């Protein structure tokens, strides 16, 4: 029987270089790496792609997110490294999950096992969607990794949607946090940027009944406070220094003027200048070993704007890791 390939290496042309020692790019620094080799490599940031929008299709959304991972890579690897880059921190690209030979459920299992393997090998990990259904395998890997830490973990989801549709009948991009809250306990869960017109009363109450915290975009806007100030105050004691945290960013939480390239975005989402100061604070104060960025859809984008935004979020995350690794 032919052995199935779990991940396909990224196209080397994505690893941009100016061939200039005085102007290196991240494409000069990254190493294409097999999953099996991660345990032998020095700690670093592992980049993984989920070129899969079947979950979005099942949920009735517009397709195109399967092209998200490589579009994000295209811009990320063109960026310059931090002036304070730590040369002892690795940068690894394990390619894209093979979606052609596995069911959606099996693909999620492979993604979860891969992320968990990276974390247990002392790496940080970025999962690039693809549909937000991959928020479950990424989140499950994180929570399983946390079991031996003796610290209560935190899961933060930036999103216009709660994504707690029941998953018993079928998995979709609307089910990741229903699954996470159903399968795991003893973690704090916060949804930020949720929009009232995108979520049913039943789903809203379901999150609250399970101890989740919802910070709606409408409440932030009506408060008169900045996004950063309001959310930081609302999170309060949850933000203790070094707390293990998984951050999930569904790109449709942003305003459509900033991130039109997704299945569903709205003019009332949060802006880039709202998000970035808060994101800087979170990744500097908390211990964020895993970041997921989902639902970037290049066919729905203009001039790569949404993919560029995702790449910039990754760049901030990478710099935060380097700052703590010094």
Image (tube, rainbow, N blue to C red):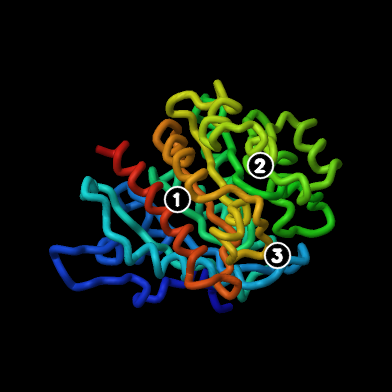
Residue at the spot of label 3 = 56
| Front label number (1 vs 3) | 3
- In the image, taking residue 194 as reference, residue 197 lies left or right, namely right
Quarter the C terminus occupies: top left
On the image, which quarter does residue 22 sit in?
bottom left
Residue toward you, 135 or 228: 228
Q: CA distance from mark 3 to mark 2?
A: 23 Å
Mark 1, mark 2: which one is toward the viewer? 2
Residue at label 2?
A: 217
Q: Considering only vertical position in the picture, is 170 above or below 54?
A: above
Q: Nearer the viewer, residue 63 or 193?
A: 193
Q: Which residue is mark 1?
A: 125
Which residue occupies 58% across, 75% down? 299
Label 1, label 3: how far apart the Cα atoms are: 23 Å
Element class at badge 3? helix
Badges 3 and 2: C-beta atoms under 8 Å apart? no
User: Residue visible at 58% across and 48% down?
Assistant: 270
Q: Secondary structure at mark 1?
A: strand
- Quadrant occupied by the N terminus: bottom right
- For residue 34, above or below residue 214: below
Percent position of residue 155, x then y: 59, 38
Residue density around tag 2, few if under 14, some if 14–19, many if 20 or more, within 10 Å: many
């Amino acid at each position: 029987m032919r052995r199935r390939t779990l991940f396909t290496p990224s196209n080397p042309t994505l690893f941009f270089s100016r061939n200039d020692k005085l102007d290196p790019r991240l494409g000069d620094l990254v190493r294409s790496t097999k999953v099996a080799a991660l345990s032998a490599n020095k700690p670093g940031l592992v980049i993984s792609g989920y070129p899969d929008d079947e979950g979005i299709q099942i949920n009735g959304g517009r397709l195109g997110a399967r092209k998200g991972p490589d579009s994000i890579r295209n811009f990320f690897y063109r960026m310059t490294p931090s002036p304070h880059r730590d040369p002892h921190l690795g940068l690894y690209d394990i390619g894209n999950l093979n979606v052609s030979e596995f069911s959606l459920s099996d693909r999620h299992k492979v993604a979860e096992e891969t992320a968990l393997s990276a974390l247990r090998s002392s790496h940080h990990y970025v999962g690039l969607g693809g549909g937000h259904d991959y928020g479950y395998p990424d989140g499950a890997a994180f929570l399983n990794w946390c079991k031996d830490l003796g610290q209560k973990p935190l899961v933060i989801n930036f999103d216009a949607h709660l994504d707690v549709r029941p998953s018993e009948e079928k998995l979709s991009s609307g089910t990741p946090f229903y699954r996470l809250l159903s399968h795991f306990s003893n973690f704090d869960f916060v949804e930020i940027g949720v929009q009232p017109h995108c979520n049913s009363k039943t789903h809203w109450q379901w999150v609250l009944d399970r101890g989740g915290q919802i910070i709606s975009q409408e409440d932030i806007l009506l408060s008169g406070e900045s996004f950063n100030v309001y959310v930081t105050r609302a999170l309060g004691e949850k933000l203790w220094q070094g707390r293990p945290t998984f951050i999930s960013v569904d790109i449709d939480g942003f305003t459509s003027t900033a991130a039109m390239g997704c299945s569903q975005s709205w003019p009332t989402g949060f802006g880039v200048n709202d998000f970035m100061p808060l994101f800087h604070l979170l990744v500097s104060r908390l211990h964020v070993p895993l970041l997921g960025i989902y639902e970037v859809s290049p066919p729905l984008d203009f001039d790569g704007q949404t993919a560029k935004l995702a790449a910039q979020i990754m760049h901030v995350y990478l710099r935060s890791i380097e700052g703590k690794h010094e």
